[in-house]
Image (cartoon, coloured by chain):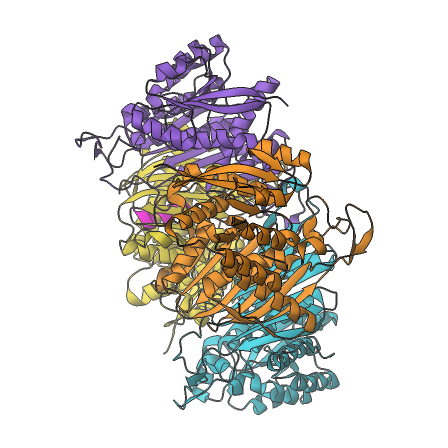
Chain colours: A orange, B cyan, C yellow, D purple
Amino acid sequence: MPQKEFRVGMIGYGFMGRAHTNAYKQVGQFFPSGYKVVLKAACARDAAKGKAFADQWGYESVETDWRKLVGRADIDAVDICTPNNLHKEIALAAAAAGKMILCEKPLAMTTAEGREMVAAVEKAGVPNMVWYNYRRIPAVTLAKRIVDEGRLGKVFHYRAKFLQDWTIKADLPQGGQGLWRLDVAAAGSGVSGDLLAHCIDTAIWLNGRMETVCGMTETFVKERPHQLTGKVEPVGIDDACTFMGRFANGSLANFESTRYARGHKALYTFEINGENMSLFWDLHDLHRLQVFDYKEEGKTRGWKSVHVTDNSPDHPYMAKWWVPGLAIGYDASFTHQVADFLQGLETGQPAGPTFRDALETQAVLDAVLDSAKSGKWVNVAKT
Amino acid sequence: MPQKEFRVGMIGYGFMGRAHTNAYKQVGQFFPSGYKVVLKAACARDAAKGKAFADQWGYESVETDWRKLVGRADIDAVDICTPNNLHKEIALAAAAAGKMILCEKPLAMTTAEGREMVAAVEKAGVPNMVWYNYRRIPAVTLAKRIVDEGRLGKVFHYRAKFLQDWTIKADLPQGGQGLWRLDVAAAGSGVSGDLLAHCIDTAIWLNGRMETVCGMTETFVKERPHQLTGKVEPVGIDDACTFMGRFANGSLANFESTRYARGHKALYTFEINGENMSLFWDLHDLHRLQVFDYKEEGKTRGWKSVHVTDNSPDHPYMAKWWVPGLAIGYDASFTHQVADFLQGLETGQPAGPTFRDALETQAVLDAVLDSAKSGKWVNVAKT
Amino acid sequence: MPQKEFRVGMIGYGFMGRAHTNAYKQVGQFFPSGYKVVLKAACARDAAKGKAFADQWGYESVETDWRKLVGRADIDAVDICTPNNLHKEIALAAAAAGKMILCEKPLAMTTAEGREMVAAVEKAGVPNMVWYNYRRIPAVTLAKRIVDEGRLGKVFHYRAKFLQDWTIKADLPQGGQGLWRLDVAAAGSGVSGDLLAHCIDTAIWLNGRMETVCGMTETFVKERPHQLTGKVEPVGIDDACTFMGRFANGSLANFESTRYARGHKALYTFEINGENMSLFWDLHDLHRLQVFDYKEEGKTRGWKSVHVTDNSPDHPYMAKWWVPGLAIGYDASFTHQVADFLQGLETGQPAGPTFRDALETQAVLDAVLDSAKSGKWVNVAKT
Amino acid sequence: MPQKEFRVGMIGYGFMGRAHTNAYKQVGQFFPSGYKVVLKAACARDAAKGKAFADQWGYESVETDWRKLVGRADIDAVDICTPNNLHKEIALAAAAAGKMILCEKPLAMTTAEGREMVAAVEKAGVPNMVWYNYRRIPAVTLAKRIVDEGRLGKVFHYRAKFLQDWTIKADLPQGGQGLWRLDVAAAGSGVSGDLLAHCIDTAIWLNGRMETVCGMTETFVKERPHQLTGKVEPVGIDDACTFMGRFANGSLANFESTRYARGHKALYTFEINGENMSLFWDLHDLHRLQVFDYKEEGKTRGWKSVHVTDNSPDHPYMAKWWVPGLAIGYDASFTHQVADFLQGLETGQPAGPTFRDALETQAVLDAVLDSAKSGKWVNVAKT
C-alpha cells in the first residue's frame, strides 16, 4: 500500500522528546499503516543541543525558534514537548498554521488556557491529541474494555494514587536542566499537574465525569535554590496533593499524589470497585491487571493477576509485539498512541484524548487547587 | 510461682465474646504469668444462649442481667462485648463497682460518652483497656518499635484504608442477630466507628496526634428492612467514610473505609512514609511487614517483605509461639492483649490503649463525622 | 448432648507436644462434638520438665515412663510426640494396650518399621492417625476438594519444595535439646523425613501414588559437635534432598527440600498443573490458594489469589472461626485434625492419614534415599 | 564522533528476526557508540515475504539464498535467526567469509555441531556472539554484579524453571509456520534446547560450571499432525525436561522446563541460595530482582523487591532509558546485547556469550538428554 507521509516537527528534546521520538520510529514496524512517519525537524533553543538530539534520533533538520518550525510547509504535525508554560502559545500558533498538534500533558497551565487551545484547534479543524499515554498501556486499555462491557455494575469507589520520592532531598534545586517540574513558573503547579493529571485523565475515561471535589496541598520544602541563579527562593509548587470527590455516577473519589512517599518511584495505581467487579492496576507492574469478579463461584473467587501479554486480540495491542509472557515497556504506550492517532486520521474517528477531552482534566485540577486554597468543596466547571 | 486469680465476667457472646474468650484460655499456655485467668461468668439476656455459650467455652456460671454480673464479688474484671450503645452504661457501673474493665472498641458512641467513661475509670482507679487488638499483631507491634527507634526521620504521609464488601447486597437487613453493626441505634455509626476506629487508633499510636480533618460519608443503600420488625426503614449508618487530615508532626493523613469495595474482605492497610524509611502493613497478610529503608545501598534497595514469624526477640510475641515461618492467626492478637494487660497489672505500667488513649480516637471520629456533615475542615478536640 | 470423654496421654512436650495440646484445648470451643477431650497425662523422662509442662498446659498428671502411661486404664488415646526413633516401640505397645494412637510424622524411621506399626494397629483394631497436619490448612483442604471434583483434567506436573535455612551455621550442634532433628540416631534422616515427608503426604493425597523416583542428597556440613557430649562427629543426616519421579497418573514429580536455602523459613510450596486448572499453595501465606482456571474467558484469565477465610461452607473449616478476611494460624491445622479424628470416631469413617496411608509416604522416602545412594531410578515399594 | 558502519545481514524474519531488528534500530538512540548500524540486507527463502519484512523493518535489500547474503562484500555481520538445524551450516560459511556472526540460541543442535562452529569462528578470528538475551535484562545483569562482588558466600543451591503452557492442545500441528519449535528435525529437541538452554546459560554465567547431571524427559502428546503435510506423525521433541545436578562449586542444581504447566506463559525463574545472600528473578516481572541479605539486621530482614529501574549507574543499562519506576520491555534486552557487542568491538573485550561460552550450555543439554535416555547420572563434557 502506498504510504502517505506524516512529517513531524518536534519541539523539545528532553525525557518526553525522546519518548515520543522512539514511538515515531517504532510505529511503522509494529503498527504499519497508510502513513509513513518522517522525522522532519527538531527544535531546541540551544542549537548545539538541538543538533545533537537530531543526529542521535534521526531528525532531518533542526530549528532553534519554534515559530519557524511551526511555519514550515514541510511539517504536517507539531509535537509539543516543552515545559507547560509554552503549550498554549505554541498550540495557538500551530493551529493557526493548520498543523496537526500532539501536545504533551497536561494540556495547559489552567482551564482558561485550555479553553483557548480547544477553541483554536476546533476552529482550525486540525487533528489534535494530548499525550496521556497511560490509557494505552495494554492492561489499562483492557480495563477500559471491561468497563465498557458494563460488567462492573454500579460503581461505588474509584481511588488513585501517584506516589514518588525523588524530591525529598532538601537541596535539590528548583528549575533548570531536567528540573523545570519544580519551577512553578514553568510547570504551573507541582504534583497536581504532573502526576494527578494522569490519574484524573484515566479516571474520567474509565468512570466518567467528576462533579465535585475537596482537596488539600502541601509544600514540604518551603525554599529551594534555583539551579540557574543559585538564589534560594520560596517554592511555588505543591509537593503533595490529596483530594476526595464525587463522580457523576455516584461513586466516591479518593486521589493522592506526592513526591515524598519514600520507596515509591512512580507508583501510579488505580482501583475501581463496582457491584459485580473490581479492577486494580499498578504502573510498577504495568503488564498486569488485577481483576476481581464477584460472579465467579464463591469457592475459588479471588483477585486474578492477569498478565496482559497474550499475542491475541484478547489483550489490546499485544498481538503486534512478542509472544505470551513477554512484557513490553512503558515506552510502548507512546508507540500505541501514535498508532491510534494515525489510525484516527485514516478512519476519521479521532483518537483520544483530544484537547477537548483533556480540558476536563484541567477543570478538575483547577477545582482541586481552588479547594485546597479555600478549604471548601468546589464544583468542577463544565467544559 | 503461686498464681493470683484473674476472674473474668464476660458480657456478650458474639464474635468478640468468642475472640476474647479464646484469648483468656490461651494466655496461660503461651504467656504464663503471675495471674491465672478464671472464666467466672458469662452474661447474655437470653438465658439459653448464655448457657450454651458458657458450656462451650468453659464459663463457670451464667447471668442474664449485666448489672448482676457487674455486682458479683467473685468477678475481678468485666469484659464488655456488647453493641456500642451499652458500653458507657456498663462501664460506668463496672467502674463504680471497682472492677477492672476491658471494653470492646470503639470505646463509645461519641466523645462525650467517652469522656464520662474516662472520668469514671480514672476516678475509680480501676485498670482499663480498649480492645484495639491490631496493635498486637506482631508485624504491627514491630512497626511501632521501628518508629520508636526514630528510624523514619521526618514523616510526610500516613495513609490507611479498611475496605470490606459484605453489605453490598441491598436486601441485607439492618439490625438483628449478627447485624447490629448496620443499626445506627446500636452501633452509633457505620464504617467510621467500626473500621476507621481501628485505623485511627493505630495511626495515633504510630504517628501521634491528628489535629485537623476533612471528611465525607456516603450511604449507598438508603433503606433496608429491619431484621426483627421486617419494616423497611432509612439506613442511619455511613456505608463509606473517607477523610484527609493533618497530624501534629506535620504529616498528611489519607483515610478511607467502606463496606462496598468489592473483592476486599477485611483489607485494613496502613502505610507511613518517612524521610528515611517507609512501612506498610496489610491485615490480609497479617504476618508480614513491608519495610523500605532508604539508608541501604542503592543497588539493592527495595521493599522488604518481613515475615514476622521468628521465634526470637526480634519479632514481638513470636518467641512464645512456634518456629520461624509458621504464622499465627488473627486471634493471637487478643491473646497478646490479655498477656500485656496482665503484665501491666504486675508491673504497674498499664497496657494501652487505656480508655484515655482510646478517647483520642473518639475525638477524631467525631471531627470526621462533623466535617462530613458541614463540608468543612474541623479541628480535632483535645482530650 | 451428653459428651463422652476422650482421655489423652501425651508422650513428649516439645514443639509438637505444645501444638497438639493447643489443639486438644481448642477443639471443643470451635468444633464441638460428642467427645470431650480430657488431658489426662503427660509423659517426659525428666520429671521436673514433665511437671512444668503439665502445669502450664493443664494435664491432670505426669508420667516419666511412657510404658506406664501406655498401660494406664484411664487413657483412651496415646499421642506420640517423641523423636522418630521411639515411634515404633511406643506405637506397638499402645496398640497392644488397645489405645487409639495419634502419632507425629513421619510415621517411622523406615518402611519396614512402618509396616510393623500398620500391622499392629490393624490387628488391634485401634483408631490411628499420623499428624500430617498440612492437609488441614483450609487452603490445602480446598485444593483437595477441587481436585476431587475432577476439575484439573489430566495432570502433567506436580512440584513441591520445602526450603528452610536454619542449619547453615556450621557450629550448630547436632542432637540435644530442640536439636534431635540433626541427630541421625534420633531422626533417622534429615530433611527427607522431616520436610519432604510433608510434601509427599500432600502429593499422594492430591495426586495419587508415586511409582518411581530418582533422588540426590547432600550433607553440606560434614561434621558437627554433639550438643550433649561436645564431641565433633560426622553428620549422618541429609541437609538437602531433591528428587524427580513419576506418578501413577502419568504426571511428573519434582521435589526439593533443604535447610540451606537462605531467606526461607519454612517455605513449603506445592503446585499441580492439570490440563484445565493449576493450583499453588505456599505455607508462608498459608491462608491463600492460587488458582488458575483455563476454562475462564481468555481476556481476564489469570492466577487467582483466593483468600480462604470465608465463614461459609465454601471454605473448609472457616465457618467455625471468625469473619471473612481474618486469617487463622498454622496451629489451627492441628485443631482441625483433632476435630476430624473425633468426627471419624463418631461416624466410623476414620480421618486420614491413617498409619496405612502414611506408610506410602515412608515407601517413597525409602526409595528416594535408596536412589540417592545408588544413583539410579528406584521403584516405590507397594504398601 | 565519526561513526563506522556496522552493516547487518539478517537471515530469518520471524519472532527473533523482528526482535533483533528492533534492537539494531534502537541501539543508536539509546546507546550511541562509534558504530552506526546499517540494515543492509534481509534474507528469506520466500522472496515476497522477504520483501515485505525488509520494507516494514527498513532493510535496504533482500536475498533469497543465505549463501549469497553471506558472500556479499557490503555485509559486516551475519545474524542467524533461522531454525536450529541451519545454524551450523550458515555459521561455518559466514566464518569462512570473514563475517562477524550473531547467532540465535541455542548455538547448535548438538555439542558436536557446536564444537565445529567454535573452531570455525576462532580459526577465522571473527567476533561472534549467541543471543542468550536474558543476561541483559537489567535485573539479571544486576544479579551477576552482586554475585561477582562475592556477596553470596558459599553457594548451596541454584534452581531454575522455564514453564509454559502453549502446546497442551493435542491438535496443535508440529512444524510449519511459527511452529518449527515442535518439529524435531528443525529444532533438534523440545523444551530442553528452547527453554532450558536459557536457564543453563544464565546458571553457568552466575554460578559456574555444571559437572554432572541426571535428567528425565517426557513427551505428553505422542503424535501430532504436521502442519504442511497434514500427516499425523510421532512427536520427536521433549515436551518436558527436568534435571538435577551438581555445580563445580559444590552447589546443587534443580532445573525444570515444560510447555504443559497450565497458567504459565513464559515463567522463567531462577534462584540462587548462598550462605549470606539469596537472589530470585522471574521473567514475568522482569524488572524486579528479589534479594535476601542475611547480613542485614534480623528485625527487618526479608526479601527485598528491587525495582531495577533507576536511571543511575546502580541499575545496569537503565541510565540510558527513562526515569525511576518506568519499566522497559523484554525487547530492550536485545538492544543491550547489540550495544554490548558493539562496545566489545571498540574495546576489544568481546561481549559474551561467545560461541565458546555457549558451547558449555550445549554440553549440559547433551548430558541431560543422554541421562534422560539412560536413566543414569552423566558427567558434563569439558568444552
Residue B71 % position (x, y): 61, 90
Q: Main secondary structure of the magenta part?
A: helix
Left or right? Give the position of A177 relative to D133: right
Please give the range of residues in magenta.
Answer: C198-208
C301, above or below D367, in the image: below
Q: Quadrant of the N terminus of chain C?
A: bottom left
Give the tally of numbered discs.
0
Q: Nearer the viewer, residue C45 or C202?
A: C202
Q: Position of residue C179 (x, y in %)?
A: 56, 45
Residue B369, position in %: x, y? 61, 80
- From the viewer's perspective, is A240 left or right of D192? right
Camera-side residue of A181 and C150: A181
User: Going 52% across and 56% down the picture, which residue do you hit?
Assistant: A121
Examine the rendered structure and indicate whether residue B184 appears above or below residue C336.
below
Front in this rendered view, residue A349 or C221: A349
Q: Would residue B19 be visible to someone looking at this image?
A: yes
Magenta stretch encompasses residue C191: no
Q: Quadrant of residue D279?
A: top right
Position of C94 with respect to C258 (left or right) is left
x and y percentages locating residue C107 in the rendered image = 40, 48
Q: Is residue A151 above or below residue C195?
A: below
Which residue is pictured at 28% across the width and 55% down the height?
C148
Residue located at (63% from left, 82% from top): B374
Nearer to us in this view, D65 or B268: D65
Q: Is residue D271 visible?
A: no
The residue under the point 47% across, 9% down is D124
> Residue lying farthest right?
A231
Q: Is residue C206 magenta?
A: yes
